[in-house]
Amino acid sequence: MYEIGSEFNYIDKDLDVRQDLTAMFEGFGDVLFLRCGRDAIGYVCEDIKSMEDTSKSASKDAPKYVALLPALCCDSMYMPFEVHGIPVRFYSVNKDLSIDTDSIKAIYNEIKENDADTKIIVLTAVYYGITDISALDSFIKSIDKEIIVIEDVTQGVMAPSYFDRESADYIIGSIRKWMGVPDGAVAIKNLAGSGFKATFVEGENSFAKLRSKALRMKTLYLQNGDQELKKGFRSLLGEAEDSLTDGLDIYGISKESREYLKSIPVKNIVSTRNNNYDTLYELLEKSVHNNVYFTLFPKKIPQMPAFMLPILMDTDRLSKDLKDGSGIDRDEFERLLAAKGIYAPVLWPVSDEAAKANPVSKEIADHILCFWIDQRYDRFDMVQTAECFEEVIRELVE
């Protein structure tokens, strides 16, 4: 069956197209390449604490930290703080993926009223290229310039010119989410005059080895459709994820991935993604089911490269109109779509604590679907995606 979406496979590079992706981050402060986004966040946590350790006197109590994260985030974003001893609070996200800045200010005030010496860290996230991250970072610094801002650019990592150099103290982002590379994430420190002080483990690790084998196995599967290969690479990918320790054990990027990233067709990747995004967005915008059974989020900021194309399903309305009188939720709709070869994953399952702090985040997490629009595909694939999506809806209600 023809498939669109899911994990990348390993693709041999076009040796005529050579651009060092790692060089894109030159001109910032200190730059490191680590194994994954979780390790990058964990590394930054340790670096923040290391700076405080060297600046305080031996008699002074260790500083207390609290990290503020958007409620719409997965465990790979908040667990690294917790495993490094930094408790987490969640601020609110609006239904259009903008940030409720009043909630950040309210949590800040509450923390400071209870303990004025608590040091506050705020992680901001680039949601599908929609969020005006620089404006958000600037607002946070206007509350208190001592707040440490960590900007998570995973969903915009291919546009370093758009990273916030003014208000973000640290920038982190996963690279492996953008291409078929075994591992890779970037961590940038913008604090003037202070290099990274934390440490990490160099050398190979099971996560990168397992993923390297899995990505190559998927390439073979795509060539011959052998279902045993599919079971094999999916099992290996699961083992790789299980080998991570939520950023507690911090590894540098593998040698294989570092070498791979030295010759990447960056411009082609970004232009293809943007073209696919624009094509699919236009097709969905014209759909008769738009604003009936689903809604589009605001279009991404033009300067941002397309990561995925998210939509919000109205499964209540869909359930009401089902011709067989039964009900359907987002997960069941996703399975029906996958049966047609279109994989539209859920990227942001939220914790109970986050859902309680911001019910809107739970609503988004329960109804969002994200379409793949990456460089593996072209306009034909986007038309196929839209047609299969429409077909599933029609089969349910007509």
Image: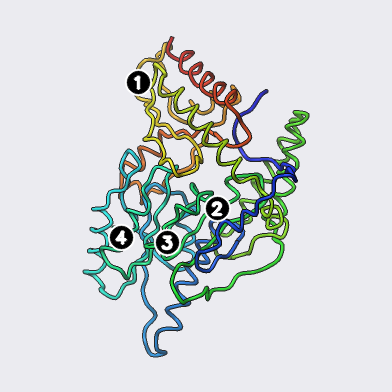
Label 2 with label 1: CB-CB less than 8 Å: no
In the picture of the structure, the residue carrying the numbered disc 2 is 174
Q: Nearer the viewer, residue 370 or 238?
A: 370
Label 3 with label 4: CB-CB less than 8 Å: no
User: Would you identify the image quadrant in which residue 321 lies?
Assistant: top left
Q: Which mark is residue 292?
A: 1
- Closer to the chain start, of discs 1 and 4, is 4
Label 1 with label 3: CB-CB less than 8 Å: no
Q: Which mark is residue 140?
A: 4
- Closer to the chain start, of discs 4 and 2, is 4
Nearest to the eye among marks 3 and 4: give it: 3
Q: Amino acid at mark 2?
A: Ser
User: Would you identify the image quadrant in which residue 109 lies?
Assistant: bottom left
Mark 1 element type = loop
Q: CA distance from mark 2 to mark 1?
A: 34 Å
Q: CA distance from mark 3 to mark 4?
A: 14 Å
**Relative to 233, is 379 on the left or the right?**
left
Q: Amino acid at mark 1?
A: Val
Nearest to the eye among marks 1 and 4: give it: 4
Mark 4 element type = helix
- Closer to the chain start, of discs 2 and 1, is 2
Q: CA distance from mark 1 to mark 4?
A: 36 Å
Q: CA distance from mark 4 to mark 2?
A: 23 Å
Q: Amino acid at mark 4?
A: Ile
In the picture of the structure, the residue carrying the numbered disc 3 is 165
Q: CA distance from mark 2 to mark 3?
A: 18 Å
How many neighbours does mark 3 have within 10 angstroms: few (below 14), some (14-19), or many (20 or more)? some
